[in-house]
Image (cartoon, coloured by chain):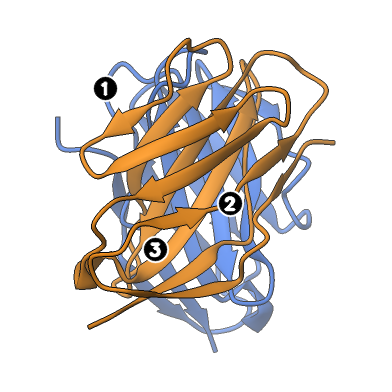
Amino acid sequence: DAGVIQSPRHEVTEMGQEVTLRCKPISGHDYLFWYRQTMMRGLELLIYFNNNVPIDDSGMPEDRFSAKMPNASFSTLKIQPSEPRDSAVYFCASTRDYSYTEAFFGQGTRLTVV
Amino acid sequence: AQKITQTQPGMFVQEKEAVTLDCTYDTSDQSYGLFWYKQPSSGEMIFLIYQGSYDEQNATEGRYSLNFQKARKSANLVISASQLGDSAMYFCAGGDIDDKIIFGKGTRLHILP
């Protein structure tokens, strides 16, 4: 398996634009997590899914953020409208079943909102 | 709410020495897992090692091992024979089984030649 795949790797966008980040988890992994990493706040959990169902989205900062997982092999994190304070590295991670013996990250998407 | 505590913001260690990085997981659940990740300057998150709360043995993976103290809910990462390439940010993460995985603030490790 190729691991968790995120796209794009880098995104530069203007304030007010819509941004969509994508993630393909490892095949067979039931859990998918979206994290945001900044210098000030470290690694924050935004939302996680179990079997494509959102379980906890309490970390989503505002209504401008939304996430979907239409099937087991794809998830999106959307920011609309984007703001400069959304600039961060966004990571997607997946793990198989509830035993949590492994949890792997994608390469991350570095988002810059100007 | 659960919380991961890493008490060492930064460490300097001489090459070839062993390193111990601290991690404690504050949770009321008895079933949980603890993870360690390495984040080099390139930015990717590299999974290192995992310890389940009901695992009988301390986890080991090559030069990485965990000193798991169940009563304290701590899983300190031990890196034996440190190398220059071990210089990186190290994150501890934890999750109650069937629940979210949260991260500590990290420890920046510097290996000195």
User: Which residue, given by chain and number where applicable, does mark 3 sit on?
Assistant: A109
- Disc number lying in front (1 or 2): 2
Chain A: drawing colour: blue
Q: Which chain, by letter, is orange?
A: B
For residue A9, above or below residue A100: below
Image mark for residue A27: 1
Tag 2 and tag 3 share a subunit: no
For marks 1 and 2, give the CA distance: 33 Å
Q: B29 or B43: which is nearer to us?
A: B29
Q: Please, what secondary structure does the residue beneath circle 3 have?
A: strand
Give the image quarter of residue B59.
Answer: top left
Residue at the spot 32% in from the left edge and 71% down from the top edge:
B87
On the question of residue A105 being in view, the answer is: no
Amino acid type of disc 1?
Ser
Farthest residue in the left direction?
A1
Instruction: Indicate left or right for A110 with A65 as reference.
Output: left
- Up the image or down, B9 lies above or below A54; here it is below
Q: Residues within 10 Å of mark 3 (few under 14, many from 20)?
A: many
Q: Position of residue B71 (x, y in %)?
A: 72, 23
Residues marked 1 and 2, same chain: no
